[in-house]
Image: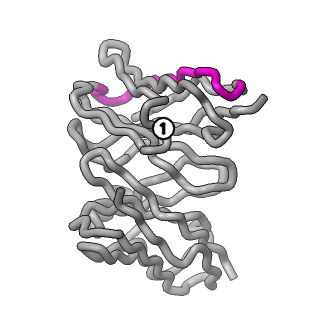
Amino acid sequence: EVQLVESGGGLVQPGRSLRLSCAASGFTFDDYAMHWVRQAPGKGLEWVSGISWNSGSIGYADSVKGRFTISRDNAKNSLYLQMNSLRAEDTALYYCAKDDEGGAAGLMDYWGQGTLVTVSS
Amino acid sequence: DIQMTQSPSSLSASVGDRVTITCQASQDISNYLNWYQQKPGKAPKLLIYDASNLETGVPSRFSGSGSGTDFTFTISSLQPEDIATYYCQQYDNFRLTFGGGTKVEIK
């Protein structure tokens, strides 16, 4: 059974940093691309970032480019999102999602339950 | 970036009704279009991929069609458990965008 478990969310002040993690199990992690998708309270879904199986292809939404960094550790079956210079508008539930391919795709077939990030002073 | 315009933003229909949601892309995306269902307090769930392919285990009352810039998602006979928000999503070489969502309620 595919499982994706996010962690690392919490309350953080504007301008500070936070690192999210996603622990994957139930599939061969290094065969698939992975994504982060967020949802602000009461709002729709926003894709944040994606990374290919070997980290060779990476993409970011314009809203986070230059502030967020996605990475993965295939030996640990883990996905990460380093979030710097956080803003109030980054407040959201952050989902980790598995792609159905290894390359630069975008079909997310499994999702975690999310970790909440709140940016506030 | 490719923009996805989804309509309507909400709808109310009776059990057994046919429900249709549309999604328009700002440029040609071929068939790189997926549909997700999100129930309250839950993570999104993939229903339709590549515009018209039903994900394994998804009931056949759900369907999708279209290519290029215009896409349609249909529930052939609305059931109480279909109460959710539905999102379209395009993918173009790690530049993904979602539509604004359609909240489906029972009349």
Q: Provide the secondary structure element on which disc 1 rests.
A: loop
Mark 1 — on which chain does it sit? Answer: A
Q: Which quarter of the figure is the N terminus of chain A placed in? A: top left
Instruction: Tell me residue B13's x, y (percent).
Output: 62, 83
Which quadrant of the figure contains the C terminus of chain A? top right
**Magenta residues, start to end:** A13-29
Instruction: Residue A11 in the image: state x and y as whole percent.
Output: 72, 26
Name the one closer to the observer, A20 or B73. A20
**Left or right, A77 with reference to A82:** left
- The residue wearing badge 1 is A64
Q: Residue at x 44, y 81 (%)?
A: B76
User: Quick one: which residue is furthest to the right in this view?
Assistant: A121
Q: Amino acid at mark 1?
A: Val
Identify the image's colour scheme: rainbow, by chain, secondary structure or one colour: one colour
Q: Is residue B23 magenta?
A: no
The residue at the point 61 percent across, 68 percent down is B83
Farthest top residue in view: A75
Residue B84: image quadrant is bottom right
